[in-house]
Amino acid sequence: MPETHTAHTDTETLIQTLHAAEATPAAVTLRERGYQLLRLHPGATVVDVGCGTGRAVAELARRGARAIGVDLDPTMLTAARSRFPDLDLRAADAIDLPLADGQAHGYRADKVYHVLPEPSLALAEARRVLAPGGRIVLVGQDWDALVIDSDQPDLTRRIVHARADTILHPRIARAYRNLLLDNGFHDVEVEVHTAIFTDATMQPLLAGHAAAARQTGAISVEEGEAWVREQTRRAASGRLMFAVPMFLAAATR
């Protein structure tokens, strides 16, 4: 029971952190840029793979698209359905989408491909569901390139790299262009948008990075506690500084 409660609490914390992060001006601008690059006409079908709590699906629907959100996480889907009860949300895997061949005019995956066991299979599935001329947009961070201000730079570097090493494909965002080309897409465009966080809502995320680094053995318990104390002080005094380069890649089927 304690483990179940802890898992539930961790998920709720993640959802709260995601809500805070996706509401920032930088995140709003990044989503809007992705929607522009999808080039959807009114009524076009677009699938948001790994839709999480549904914000992008709702925004695409408000823009006049027939938006479909898919996710494998039942907790995320429950949260999405609670927030947006009228959306078309489905439980599905990125490599087995509930769409017919050529049904979609747009495909979007935001912060998804770094956790997929075989990203190329997901891109093959994207090609299957996209009509000729359909557009794909991938968004994600490079986990090795996070920038965190700290009085302990060497320790921070170890924490960032150790956290990255717990991710299945931590550097996949920098490879988006070549992945798209290798899987038959063309007209590939790549942009980098830097999200900057200075408010205390990001402190739990940074604490999670330290916890992950401790679990890998890259830092000691004492080092982790000292680093989290520093970031907590920075958050409380308005001195937190956390920058995340976000890669946005768009291409045509």
Image (cartoon, rainbow, N blue to C red):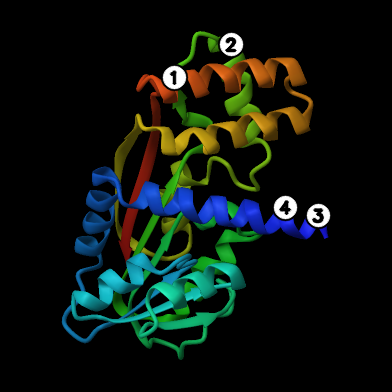
Q: Which mark is residue 162?
A: none
Picture coordinates of residue 134 (x, y %)?
30, 75
Q: Residue at x 52, y 46 (%)?
A: 172
The mark closer to the camera, 2 or 1, is 1
Residue depicted at 38% across the width and 19% down the height: 237
Hey, which residue is sitting farthest right in the picture? Answer: 1
Image check: 6 left or right of 189? right
| 71 relative to 7, above or below | below
Q: Residues within 10 Å of mark 3 (few under 14, many from 20)?
A: few
Real-space Cα distance between discs 4 and 1? 26 Å
The dot on residue 154 is 2
Q: Is residue 5 above or below residue 128?
A: above
Q: Residue 5, image x and y in percent?
A: 73, 57
Q: Earlier in the sequence, mark 2 or mark 3?
A: 3
Q: Which residue is mark 4?
A: 6
Q: Residue at x 48, y 39 (%)?
A: 142
Q: Quadrant of residue 135?
A: bottom left
Q: Could you tell me the amino acid type at mark 2? A: Asp
Nearest to N terminus: mark 3 or mark 1: 3
